[in-house]
Image (tube, rainbow, N blue to C red):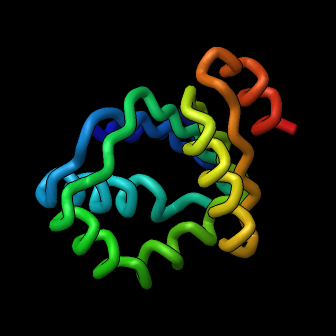
Amino acid sequence: MFKITKTSSNRLDIELSGKLNSEEMKIALDEFESKSHDIENGLMLYDVVEFHLPSLEAIAIEFSRLPSMFTLIRKFRKAAVLADKNWIQVASEFEGLLIPGIEIKAFNRDQKAEAEKWLAA
């Protein structure tokens, strides 16, 4: 499941759980694009409830849309990632080093208040 909620004019909250197939990936990317098109100086809060690698077909869809996703990600300046698995936290923060203009910080899922505070700073 991939659920996106626009909580303010410049913030998206994204909940990720389970394994995405190609159709779910297409829907998720379309929703991300539509909900972020008018965002500037944006913030994201990712809540990774239970992560499974997407299907190969879903990954292919994601890769085919990378150019448009890189354009959209530039609309955001910060992303907080809530995850209980250390490797997801490390991978998230590493991704932030690879994408110019966005700072990504990982938190344990029980640290939502701290993540909120960091996003607001």
**Number of numbered discs:** 0
Left or right? Give the position of 110 relative to 47.
Answer: right
Nearer to me, 84 or 21: 84
In this rendered view, identify the residue nearer to me: 117 or 97: 97
Between residues 56 and 65, which one lies in front from this camera angle? 56
**x then y, percent, for residue 40:** 65, 61
Q: Residue at x 27, y 35 (%)?
A: 18
Write down the quadrant of residue 108 in the picture.
top right
What residue appears at the point 74 percent right and 67 percent down from the top-left corner?
Answer: 97
The answer to whether residue 67 is left or right of residue 114 is: left
Q: Position of residue 107 (x, y in %)?
A: 69, 31
Residue farthest front in this picture: 87
Q: Split into 4 quadrants, where in the image is the C terminus?
A: top right
Q: In x, y percent, where is residue 101?
A: 75, 70
65 sits to left or right of 38: left
Check the image and name the residue furthest to the right.
121
Residue 1 vs 54, above or below: the answer is: above
The residue at 39%/40% (across/down) is: 4
* Quarter of the figure with residue 11: top right
Q: Quadrant of the N terminus?
A: top left
**At x 59% / y 22%, what residue is drawn?**
109
Provide residue 110's location: percent of width, then percent of height.
64, 15
Q: Tell me: residue 96, above or below residue 89.
A: below
